[in-house]
Amino acid sequence: MSDIQIEVCNGVGMITLNRPKALNALSLPMIRELTAALLGWRDLDTVHAIAIRGHGKEGPFGAFCAGGDIRFFHQAGLSGDPRLEDFFTEEYSLNHLIHCYPKPYIAFLDGIVMGGGMGISGHTRQGAKHRIVTERTKMAMPETNIGLFPDVGGGYFLSRCPGRTGEYLALTGHMLGGVDALQLGLADVMVDSGSLNDLWGEVARTGLVALEHAQRSDTAGQSGALVAHRQQIDHFFGLASVKEIIDALEADDSKWATDTAGTLRQRSPLMLHVVLEQVRRGRSLGLADDLRMERDMVRNSFHLRPGAASETVEGVRALAVDKDHSPRWNPARIEDVTADMWRAFFDSPWPAHAHPLRHLN
């Protein structure tokens, strides 16, 4: 059976990610199928809207998308597989296509929504986005835990979260629930997970009319976990450097500061520096330019230090291959990262006229 199920029902292009054992992690063939479907429907008068969901281990919904296939990243990084280059070029092109899509795009973000799953969630498209979360939503950009950075436009959409929550989410990889996602502008509607099957069926029958009549979860008076710590987040994560952030957190004796510092100490010290710069540069960039920057960064993540020396290859090894959860970060300490180390990630390997994403506008 295909990893993606695609059909058109009453003018709605219906997409189901169907790789439940891998939490619908995106492979290159899946990216190509998604792109082909969306391009085919874009100018088709008989298709008026798009809906996308993930199939969980126990049936429809329960998991949207856990991101890119990091095991493939590991294998390709070690072997020099050229498909790794294709993966990121085509994934980022797909992210841009979704962002600029001229038709309503309805994303059912139930369960895990991480990394590359955020890239196909329809982020930041005002007026044509319908990002539906539930009480089971677990949303995060946890890439610093695998020696990478929040890509798929993360520099763009995280930097536009309120205050310094973007820096916080990018550096720590903190997981958000549905209420948090709404409050940070990363989702639009919250419904009860038990209503998803009916809502999906209604979308197939009536399109956007179903959303007008959807039973929203009552979030009035609810506060996400981040709200209680917004003042601390804005203070600490507004500081000028990773070193200043960690020093200030470790000088604070509150439980939140201690726990947050402990989380940062587990992440790749090098990529923490890269990510802080990424988010702050992303604040002044449009999505196309941000994706071009991230394409440079991801190429450098695998080629500045090739093979097993790559921070990303090592991070994936520790988390998903050997599963020893003991990555050998290089440098090992936040204090040992120099500016020259992290700045190199922003040097483009290509002249502008030859950039693989030069066509994005």
Image (cartoon, grey):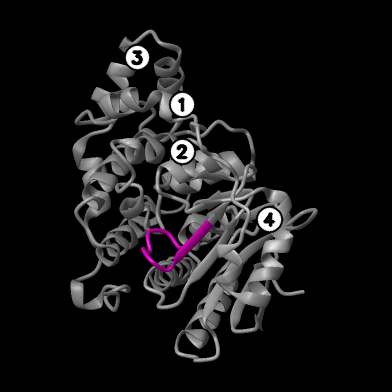
Between residue 136 and residue 156, name the one nearer to us. Answer: 136
Between residue 307 and residue 207, name the one nearer to us. Answer: 207
User: Hey, which quadrant is residue 290 in on the image?
Assistant: bottom left
Q: Tell me the number on the disc at residue 22.
A: 4
CA separation in Å, label 3 and label 1: 11 Å
Amino acid type shown at disc 1: Thr
* Quadrant in which the N terminus appears: bottom right
Circle 2 Cα neighbour tier, 10 Å, few/some/many (<14 / 14–19 / ≥20): many
Ranked by sequence position, the earlier of labels 4 and 3 is 4
Percent across and percent down for residue 329 are 43, 34
Amino acid type shown at disc 4: Ala
Disc 3 target residue:
250
Magenta highlight range: 122-131
In this rendering, position of residue 112 left or right of residue 230: right
Amino acid type shown at disc 2: Gly
Ranked by sequence position, the earlier of labels 3 and 2 is 2
CA separation in Å, label 1 and label 2: 9 Å
Q: Is residue 309 visible?
A: no
Ranked by sequence position, the earlier of labels 3 and 1 is 3
Disc 2 target residue:
173
Ranked by sequence position, the earlier of labels 1 and 2 is 2
Amino acid type shown at disc 3: Glu
